[in-house]
Image: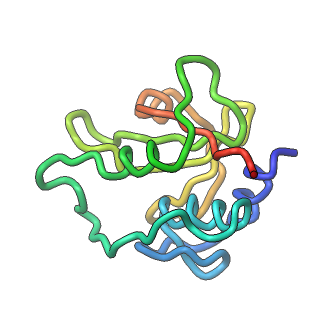
Amino acid sequence: MNRVVTAARGWIGTPYRHGASCRGAGCDCLGLVLGVWREVHGTEPEPVPAYGPDWSEVGGEERLWAAARRHLEPRGPGRIGAGEVLLFRMRAGAVAKHLGIATGRGRFVHAYSGHGVVESALTPPWARRVVARFGFPKEG
């Protein structure tokens, strides 16, 4: 099994806590990806500044997308692979600011407000919101 998928599934059941990244205690979608990074690669690649629920919306900066490009490997068009980080735009014209980790067979793990960390089907409403895909860097 893919190490990233195994790590992501280990977070299932963690409650949703905005700005947190502690398996079992609380995380948001970014905290989930950061936690999986720590489990697979060790120390996070850069400090994450505090952010509010509306971060990046004023001014329309694609901060999450830019950070993903700095540290993850962009994927081109094609089938979503297990272990890929999915970046979602939740509303047309809004910045992309939701993340999940593909687990294969049309499913993904994500931290979702009101639900905590869950594994969901990548149904058409979710799939059409995916704007970018990234792979974790290879272990060195």
Query: Residue 6 is drawn in which quadrant?
Result: bottom right
Q: Residue at x 53, y 60 (%)?
A: 111
Q: Residue at x 43, y 27 (%)?
A: 128
- Indicate whether 98 appears above or below 53: above
Query: Residue 134 is drawn in which quadrant?
Result: top right
Name the one closer to the observer, 74 or 24. 74
> Residue 130 vs residue 137: left or right?
left
Farthest residue to the top: give it.
Answer: 78
> Residue 37 vs residue 52: left or right?
right
Q: Position of residue 79 (x, y in %)?
A: 64, 21
Q: Position of residue 13 (x, y in %)?
A: 67, 68
Q: Position of residue 71 (x, y in %)?
A: 51, 50
Farthest residue to the left: give it.
Answer: 59
Query: Residue 23 is drawn in which quadrant?
Result: bottom right
Farthest residue to the front: give it.
Answer: 140
Q: Position of residue 73 (x, y in %)?
A: 56, 38
